[in-house]
Each structure stands twice: as structure tokens, then as C-alpha cells.
Amino acid sequence: MKIKNLLLIPALMGTMAIASDYNYEVTPVIGYNVAEGNLNLENEIITGLEAQYNGFDFPIKPEIAVLYSGGVKSEDTLPTNKTNITRFMLNGVYELEGMDSVVPFVKAGVGYETMNRQIAENTDGAFVDAGAGVKIPLTDAIALKVEALYMLKYNKHTTDNKWGDSNLALLAGVTFAFGEKAQKAAPVDGDDDNDGVKNSIDECLQTPPGTSVDTRGCTLDGDDDNDGVTNSADQCPTTEAGVATDELGCKLEADDDKDGVTNALDICPATPFGEAVNEDGCPHNVVLHIKFDHDSSNIAGESDAIMQKYADFLIQNKNYSAKIIGHTDSRGSAAYNQKLSQKRAKSVENMLIEKGAPATSLSSVGEGEANPMADNSTSEGRAHNRRIEAELTKN
């Protein structure tokens, strides 16, 4: 059978569940039936009623349905040759769980089709059916229902293929649920160790009988996890034996660079010892050990890895901005040094952007020879003063 048109399911989305809290569902439906070509019947309008029972504690719910089509014409006989078709069905319905906005379902069963007048080789007969659809909740007890139902009929007058007569019904309706189920009683919250604290909040479920306990059900002023912090002050009462803890009884986190920020929170995990850092473990200023060609703003190729590493930091931490600051030693005129430091800072900014760092998080400035960090009278001091700094700011 060829189907040229598909049923379009409305995109209405609800947020409420339906049916599971009610024993009964009734759905008046209307739709369109597409008959197999060899039945010589015109496609028909269908009306009907579906009724589903949810009272059984079983995933498959029974459904009875009646579908009626009046005045169905033959395609190759006189217009006066019409018949009324009534279909009775008994189906099992399985609803898929886990979705809030729709309730998908599948169904299958058996049925019987009657005609008040035989047309061509069509006659009364049994059929099997299978279908699928969705219910879209409008309230907690009302839902829009759409489905497609395939019916395969046994026709005793068909000599070549007795099971070859099929119909496809596309149906839509409104489901009304009623008969609210009794709610299950909440489980009893016991006190297994008889310490006066319910199991649901008892953090020490095996307290010896007769022991005085705190509000958590733990030995009063004891130290049940042997971490050196009494139960009344211990905010982590089940710390593993032998684990170092803080004054609250909680596991001490590692801090490999000793900057006061634990590894789990430190986004700058290799800060030099003694450097002042912010809450993320990052220093306000850091020297980028970038090398330039002599008396030039061209960045030497050996600095590429350093540039990529700092660009990656800015890519991964978009809540930070960096101001690139260029410095020189005191050789040459102050005006020349100021210009050179600005060009070098700008070169670093541009390369960081080329390597993926957000342009909006970068700026650059040159300070020339104005802020030395070492003595300009020695070659070693001048080398320290010729530097690029990154001033980090949390947005």
C-alpha cells in the first residue's frame, strides 16, 4: 500500500504528567483511514471512542476501542453502493516513561470489522492491529492524543492472499482521565540503632545501645572517624582512617605550589613560591619569558611554546583579561625605549590573538625604562629589565 500523506503531529508541549494517577481514560477520536488499493474502497473519515484502564499494577494497560465510518463508497461501482464499517478492538497499551512533556505509547491487539453491505469481495472479518502515538498533556487529567494504527484483516473472499487486506488509520482526539488512584503510603522512617535519631538523618547508624548522641545520631563528643575532631564539631564525620584533616574534620586538599589555594581550585598551579595570588591561585603580574630579535619587536621562534601556553590559559579562562606591558633597560634614549617597549608589547598581544586568545580580553602598553626591576648598571640587571609582563585582571 502506498501512503502519500503523513500525519503532522502538533508541536504543543506540556509540562504535566497524565494517566498514571488515574484509573480510567476515555478518548473520543476522529481521523482518516487509508484503505489498501485492492479493497476498491474510498478512503474514509473515522469517528470513534477509546477507553483505557490503568488500575492494574502491570506495564501493559488494556484498551477497548470502537471506530465507525459511515457511507463508505466503492471506487468502481455506483455511488449508491455504500456501506457502513464498524471496527471493534481489544488492545494492550504500553506507555514509555521518562519524558515530562509528552507520553509516547505503542499498542497492539485484535479486532473485528463489520459491514452492513458487502462491496466487491469485502466482508466481515477479524483483524490484528498495531500502532504508536503520543499524548501531550494539557492539564493533569486532559491531554491531546494522536496516533497511527495499522490493521491487517482476514478476508475469506480473497483467494490469493487471505491476510492481504490492510488499512492505516490516522487518529487524533482528546483524552479525559478520571478515577484518581489512592496514593501509596510513605515509607516509615525507622530508628534501627535506637538512639532517638531517625535513619533518614542519622549519620552514625550503628551507635552502641545506650550511648548519648548528638542531633546527627553520632556519639556525643566522641570521635567516630578517629580524625582528631570530636563529632559535635566534625563536618565530615566519615573521613577515611589516616587521612589528614582540617579543624572541621574534613580532608585536607593538596596544594602543590604552596600558594594557599588547593589544587582543585588552582587554575595557575605552578606559581613561584611566595608569590601573592588571588582566589584562583593566579598572581596579579607574571613575567612572560619572551625573547625578541636584537633591537626589534620580532618575537623569536623559541618563544612560541610560551606564547601558546599563555594563549591557552586565556582561551580556557574567559573571565580573565590581560594587559601586556613592555619594559626595556636604560640604554638608549628614553623616547626610543618607550617606543620599542610599546611595539614589543603590541607584538605579543597580536601573537596571542593569532593563537586563539580572545581579542576583547587583551590590551598592551609600553613603559620603556621607567620601571626597572634590577640594577641597569650590570648586564644581568639589564637582562632582567628587558621583559614582558602580563597584568591579569578577573572580569
Image (spheres, helix red, strand yellow):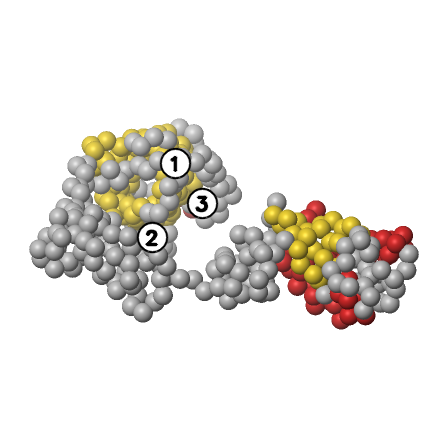
Tag on residue 37? 3
Is the residue under label 2 in contact with that under label 1 (CB below 8 Å)? no
Quadrant of image for the C terminus: top right
Q: Is residue 134 left or right of residue 306?
A: left
Q: Position of residue 361 (x, y in %)?
A: 68, 48
Q: Residue at x 12, y 56 (%)?
A: 211
Q: Is residue 227 left or right of residue 253?
A: left
User: Where is residue 182 drawn, in percent x and y?
Assistant: 17, 37
Q: Which dot, 1 or 2, sits closer to the camera?
A: 1
Q: Gap in Å between the C-alphas at discs 3 and 2?
A: 14 Å
Q: Can residue 331 be seen in the rendering of this structure?
A: yes
Spatial CA span between label 3 and label 1: 42 Å
Position of residue 29 relative to residue 385, above or below, is above
Query: Which residue is found at the position 81% from the left and 70% from the top?
Result: 379
Which mark, residue 43? none
Describe the element under mark 1 as helix, strand or loop. loop
Q: Nearer the viewer, residue 366 or 264?
A: 366
- What type is the residue that disc 2 sits on? Trp
The correct choice, above or below, for 201 with respect to 372 in the image is above
Q: Amino acid at mark 1?
A: Thr
Q: What residue is pinned by disc 2?
A: 163
Amino acid residing under circle 3:
Gly
Of 86 and 38, nearer the camera is 86
Looking at the picture, how far across and down is residue 260, in whole percent? 50, 59
Q: For numbered disc 2, what is the local secondary structure?
A: loop
Front tag of 3 and 1? 1
The percent position of residue 116, horizontal first and vertical second, equals 29, 33
* Figure quadrant of residue 161: bottom left
